[in-house]
Image (spheres, rainbow, N blue to C red):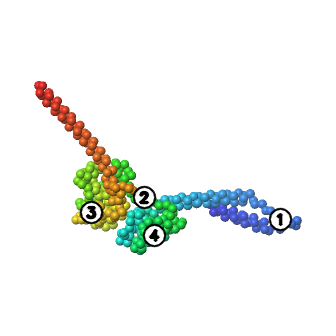
Amino acid sequence: MNKRKYEDALNTLDKTFQSTNAIKPAKSGTTRKSKMPDELERRVNWFSMTHKLQSRKRQSAKEISDTTTRSDLFGFEKFIERLQTFSLRTYTSKPAELSPPAVALKGWQHDNGHRNRIVCTKCKQGLIVDFSATQPSNTYSKQLTSAHAASCPWRYQYCPDSMYRIQELYLPPSLAANSVAERARRIDSIIPFHIQINHPLSGAQVDTLLRSLPEPRPSKESSILALYGWEHKPTALPSETLLVSQLDCAVVSLKSDKSVDVVRNHRFYAPQLTPSFQGSSTSGAEALYDKITRRGRKKQLEESFVLDSISRQAVVKNIRGLLLGHHS
């Protein structure tokens, strides 16, 4: 409808201009100014206002789209996508400040076609991180920012370090325990055989962990796997059973006759193995264990208090019975 009105307005305007051109100038040397018809003037004004309004709407929608795209660029899902491109076979022997998560937080992904080469997902600039060229690591750390194009948003902003942390550490103990338990229950519900695992926890620590998880409690093996960040990964092959650690993209193929090492099967930069926070001597998995078992230790203390109260009441009752029996 708007297009039809616009075409009608232009046709009327053309006719007016044609009739104006046909008018001969007056002999006095003055020109006669033609007046636009009222109806035409209203239509042209209406069209002009409508066109401006639609232009503003398109501009606003574009700004919203650009903002959304920009926020997605710095989001967790995009970060994991960049991290998944790194292969330890072609990007090796890097210090912590140039590890895969460190460069992925600043917008880089691994160029699998070239050894030790990373490329920006936005500006497509590339950088080869090769220590055989005797270039110090701090030079490369600076280039993680300066190597981006001048117009690239990664040159002026990057993902916070807190993005590469065990997310349960930011939750209250009860919610952290629920998250780990849910991950463990999914493993129990899908894995059709008993999982053999190697882990650094003592028997007492395992008991405390299990006591800290909500009912229904998962198995011991799946609880330890979930504590260290492992979860089931769906596959297209029914005969294949995989575990994956999302934050370091490590994958383990499960077999009934093969044990899983919950620590060694991680990549060296996994947040479960590295300090939980800057300056901390506690690893991420240890910090998560401490957070979860606060709930278990509190419950254990409450149970001990109840048992002690029952024991004291029993002792008092026995003493009273003895005294009554003695008097009788």
Helix, strand or loop at mark 4: strand
* Residue that numbered label 1 is attached to: 31
Figure check: 147 above or below 279 = below
State the residue at coordinates (25%, 40%): 305
State the residue at coordinates (45%, 69%): 119
Mark closest to the chain's N terminus, 1 or 2: 1
Can you tell which of label 4 and label 1 is closer to the viewer?
4
* Residue that numbered label 4 is attached to: 119
Q: Amino acid at mark 2?
A: Asp
Q: Amino acid at mark 3?
A: Val
> Real-space Cα distance between discs 1 and 2?
74 Å
Label 4 with label 2: CB-CB less than 8 Å: no
Mark closest to the chain's N terminus, 4 or 1: 1
Mark closest to the chain's N terminus, 4 or 3: 4
**Residue nearest the observer in this picture, 3 or 283:** 283
Which disc, if any, is residue 260?
Answer: 3
Can you tell which of label 1 and label 3 is closer to the viewer?
3
> Real-space Cα distance between discs 1 and 3?
96 Å
> Real-space Cα distance between discs 3 and 2?
29 Å
Mark closest to the chain's N terminus, 3 or 2: 2
- Quarter that holds the N terminus: bottom right
> Real-space Cα distance between discs 4 and 1?
67 Å
Spot the residue most to the top.
328
> Real-space Cα distance between discs 4 and 2?
20 Å
**Residue nearest the observer in this picture, 103 or 146:** 146
* Residue that numbered label 2 is attached to: 161
State the residue at coordinates (55%, 61%): 62
Figure check: 171 above or below 71 = above
